[in-house]
Structures are given as structure tokens and as C-alpha cells.
Image: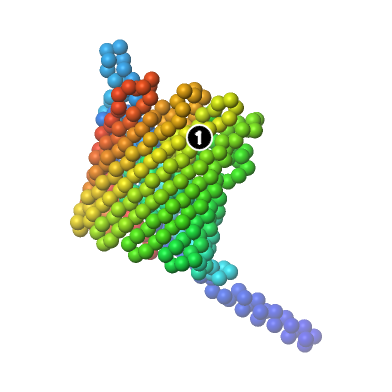
Amino acid sequence: MKKKIILGLSLVCLFSNLFSQEKKFGFEFYGWISPQYFINSHEIVEARDGQLSLYPKPADYDENGKDKNQNTNQNFSAAASRFGARIFLNDILGAKVVGNLETDFTGQSDANMHLLRLRQANVKMSWEKVSLTMGHGWSAFCVPEMMPAMQDLNNGAPFHPFSRLNHIRVDYSPLKILNIVATAGWQRDYASIGIGGGRDYKQQSFASIPELNLQLQVKTTNLFAGVGAEYKELKPNKDKDAILSSFAYTAFLNYKNKDFNLKLQAISGGNLNDYCMIGGFYEFNGNYTPTTINSLWCDVSYSLGRITPALFIAGATHDFDRTHINTYGSGMSVENLYRIAPRVDFFLNKDLFFTLTLEYTNVKYEDQVCKERIGNYRLGISLLYKFSSK
């Protein structure tokens, strides 16, 4: 009996010791409120109630020779406001663990505007030289350090790649200044456009291979630069064996000091509409061939204290054999386009500022669609109030 009592007390002490270990949970809540007003001189190809502006529509002339798309249009929205949380957990297997959940109110499509949309939902485990991230987050070509600093929802699209997906990501840093990134991704909201004319993530599911990315990054005090490559397979028609294969490449550079910030990125590849860029593929003799996009953009800013002037400039070309009629994608009749967008940020404090943007986007369509170049002037005024519990 005495032995049983001693054994019972020992077990109680053991479990008490286990459960008395402190559970270290930490939370950081963050986000911003961002009402935005904009007005266009011409009707545009857009999404999310016009907040995601891409390029002007082609001219559509009536019997009197008037362009029916030459209409001034405007809107005001706060749907780009967002909030998120970072959850800091106990170390596991020697790794720092951080969870991230983030949402905004722009929905998964125009029909779902003002409904919550999943932006980030991932867990990152970080060791000394290796980190593992699993969940929903930025695509590899959409490098967070390389985001243009503008407040527009398009974030530089269709020149700057903009996309999120479900992925597994591994970062390996053999040197302090060097980081190697490898990802395997599965499309969802930002899926490639299929033969049905809409975004269809099942094209990738039927191809049975994730989107693969490999990237090399170099980072010093003032410089961040890198190169990357992507391979993607889709099966546009599940009832046929034909596979759509495409490669894409990128190179980027960010130089900044106390007041100056320069970002530059080049992208070249096939079937990149899953990045909110133009392009797609065509079908010929039962085979699928991607169309090629070449894009270059630059965002530069200089702080003058409470005022920060900046300039975004970009251009893109869309190349493929245009004799084919079975084409699928975004902007398939676009040959080239460019954008010039100066802006000024007016800071009331570090977390509250106004932005005034004047954006000019010009596009050249195929001659059979529109012979002259079409331009659109867009004036935007936004307020951004950032908040954080940190």
C-alpha cells in the first residue's frame, strides 16, 4: 500500500511538472484603414470596383465616330483596408515558430466585394540557417521586399507580378548575405485562366505537379538583389493528354538608404496571367503553347521629411504568333503597354499619410481590334492609417 501511495505521488509530481511549464504565446495585431478615391479619363480593364486598374479598353466607335469608351468614371472605396495577426509560439524542435493570419475586404471576385478574403494563412519555423513556411502566402515572383510603395490595389500590375497561393517554402542561408529559396505552390484565387475563359485552379490539379520556383537572393545593409526561375504545368482540358508547360524568369534589385529607395525588376516568361499580368496560351493541332510576356518596372522615391515624391514607370510586351484564333488568357489582343505614375506622399506622422497619384497608362492593341494607341489618365487620392499592437 505504501509503495502504491509513493508511486501515485510520484506520478502526480511528474505530470504537475510537465503541465506547469510556461506556455509562451505572443500576439501582434496589425493592419491599416485605407479609403481611396480615383477618377479615370477612359474606361479601363479593371476589377474590384475599379480599384484594381490594369489598362484602358480599346476604342469602340459609334456611327458618328465617337469612342463610346471615352467616358470619365470614378469611384470611392475603403475595401482595401485590412487586418492581420502574428502568433508567436513556443520553440519547437529548436525552431522559432510564427503563425500569420491576414485578411481584407476585397473578396475573391467582383461579386464578393466587401466580403473577407484570405490573404495570409501560414506557419513559419526558423532555425539558424533554414526556415520552413507552409500555408497561404505570396508567390515566389512576388517578393515582399520588392513591392512598389504605391497605395493602389493593383500594386504595379500588370507589370509587377502580384499573386498569392498555397505553398511550401524553404529558405536556406549558407552565408549571412545569401539566401536560397525553393517553393512548391498550388494555385487558388489567383489561378491561371483556362479554356472556359475564367480562372481555374483545377488545371494545375489535373496536371499533378505543383508550381516550382527556385530563387537566389543577396542582401546587405543597403542592397537587396536576386534572380529566380519558375516552372509550371497545367492541363487545360482534363479529357485530353496535352499539357501546357511554361517557364518564367526574373531579376530584381532594391537599393535604399535613409532617404532614397530604388526598386527595379524584370520578368520574362509564358502564361503569366496568374500574376495579374497579361498573357496566356493558344491551342494548335491539339497542343498548347504559352504566349511570352516581357516586363520591366522601376519604382523610385526620395524622402524630404514629411513629403516623399516618387515615380513608378513600367513597360511590357506580349509576343506570340497572332494568326492563331484559339487563344485563352488575359489581354490576348494587347501587343504592348506602358505606364508613368508620379505620386507624392504627405505624412502627418509615420502611421498616417495621404497619397496623391497621377497615373498615365497607354496600350497598343492588335490592329484588327484598335489601330491607334489608347491612353488613360487616372487621378488617385488615398488616406492610409496603419496600426499595430507591437
Label 1 secondary element:
strand
Q: Position of residue 311 (x, y in %)?
A: 26, 46
Q: Is residue 260 left or right of residue 293?
A: left
The residue under label 1 is which amino acid type? Pro
Q: Position of residue 256 (x, y in %)?
A: 30, 58
At x 53% / y 58%, what residue is drawn?
170
Q: Is residue 220 left or right of residue 270?
A: left
At x 49% / y 59%, what residue is drawn?
180
Front residue of 95/213: it is 213
**Residue 150 can be seen in this image:** no
Q: Is residue 60 above or below residue 125?
A: above
Q: Position of residue 387 (x, y in %)?
A: 34, 57
Q: What colour-coding does the image apply? A: rainbow
Q: Position of residue 22 (x, y in %)?
A: 54, 74
Residue at image mark 1: 290
Q: Is residue 131 above or below residue 59?
A: below
Q: Is residue 305 above or below residue 251?
A: below
Please rate how many residues cluster around mark 1, counting C-alpha atoms within 10 Å: few if below 14, some from 14 to 19, many from 20: many
Front residue of 340/180: it is 180
- In the orientation shown, which residue stands out farthest toward the right? 1
